[in-house]
Structures are given as C-alpha cells and as structure tokens.
Image: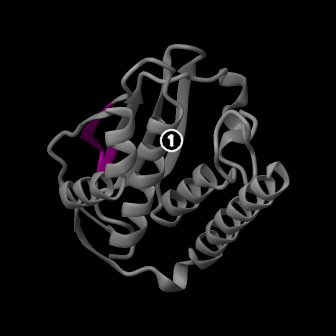
Amino acid sequence: MGFLENMRSASHRMRNLIQDLLLFSQINKEKLEFAEVDLNEIAQEASQDLEIAIEEKQAVINLPVFPVITGDKSMLRQLFENIISNAIKYSRPLHKPVVDITCKEENGFLEIAFKDNGIGFDEQYVPQMFMLFQRLHGRAAFEGTGLGLAICRKIVEMHAGSIWANGREGEGATFFVSLPLNTPGN
C-alpha cells in the first residue's frame, strides 16, 4: 500500500510541475493583452480561486481599495494568486494565516505589499527565491514546484515593474510588487 501511495504522490507532484512549467513557458511578451485592469476585481477573483485553502486554514485576507492600472488581466490575477497562496501555504502551525495587502501610488507606480504572519524566511535567501526551481523548504514540509515566485517575477518584469521581499524567520514575510500605473507603450 505504501508503494502505491508513493507512486500516486509522485504523479501528483509531476502533474503540478508540468502545469507550472507550461504556465511559465506561456508567459511571453507577444501574448500580453494590455488594457485597463481593476485590481479590486483581480484580488476578489484570486481570493475566490483560493477559497478552499482560505477556509481550510481559516485565513483572513485584508484587501485595500485598489486603483485601475494598465496590465494583462490574466497575468495579474496569476500574480495575486501565487503570492496569496504562498502566504497561506507558509503559515505557522496553530496560527490563522492573516494576509494584509496594502497599496500606495508613488511617481507613476503602484506599490503593493502582501504582508503575512507566516513562517517567514532568512533574508539571505531572497535572491534565489525568485529563481526557477528554488525552494527554501523541503517537499516534505510544504508542497510546491519551486516555480511560483519565478512566475511572479516574470509577470512583474513583463509589466515593467519589480518584485522583492523581506521577512524574518518565525515572524512572517512581506512581498512587494511595484507596477507602473500605465505600462510603457500603452
């Protein structure tokens, strides 16, 4: 029975890896469809897509009032989903995950902060966090393919923005995304 369970688990991980690789490979400049995007809708849709995980962990997602920016709607939705999903996934045992999302406009950019009360991380690992297949925690501790933040980085860069993070082990993390209000060329 253990052998079959291991095979099922391995096939599940392989399916997730293939799906994430396909998503990563499909993100390219030619397919971007820039238009006005209401980030309030994006945040709500991402939260709805994560409804099961939110309910399972009794997570609280605090959303601000977002502005409308120029961007690719589906990619921005993926960005929000990946960051919020990580905040829920990397929560501390016996603590309800709380994700406080804030935003501010400055010099033509919108800076969005996704602050959580999760397990945090050692800041020496920030550079590798946004690279393909990089994981700070073993597969046994947390599921995942190591592609989520690399996908986020690629989406943000294609929107002429930037992404970075800070955190402390045991105290949570904050992921920052800076996006132009009006993407250059639009």
Residue appearing at x 62%, y 70% in the figure: 19
Write the start and end of the magenta stretch as one range: 99-111
Q: Quadrant of residue 107?
A: top left
Q: Quadrant of residue 111?
A: top left
> Most extreme residue toward the front, as rendered?
1
Residue appearing at x 71%, y 59% in the figure: 13
> Most extreme residue toward the bottom, as rendered?
30
Q: Is residue 181 left or right of residue 67?
A: right
Q: x, y (%) of residue 161?
A: 46, 54
Q: Is residue 171 left or right of residue 142?
A: left
Q: x, y (%) of residue 145?
A: 69, 53
Q: x, y (%) of residue 128?
A: 73, 40
Q: Where is 152 relative to 184, above or below?
A: above
Residue appearing at x 73%, y 37% in the figure: 140
Residue appearing at x 41%, y 44% in the figure: 84
Give yes or no for residue 98 being in the magenta stretch: no
**Majority secondary structure in the magenta region:** strand
Quarter of the picture containing the C terminus is bottom left
What amino acid is found at the position of numbered circle 1 in the picture?
Asn
Q: Quadrant of residue 10?
A: bottom right
Give yes or no for residue 109 being in the magenta stretch: yes
| Camera-nearest residue between 70 and 138 | 138
> Most extreme residue toward the right, as rendered?
3
Q: Residues within 10 Å of mark 1 (few under 14, many from 20)?
A: some
| Camera-nearest residue between 32 and 122 | 122
**Scheme by which the image is coloured:** one colour
The residue labelled by disc 1 is 86
| Camera-nearest residue between 27 and 69 | 27
Badge 1 marks a residue whose secondary structure is helix
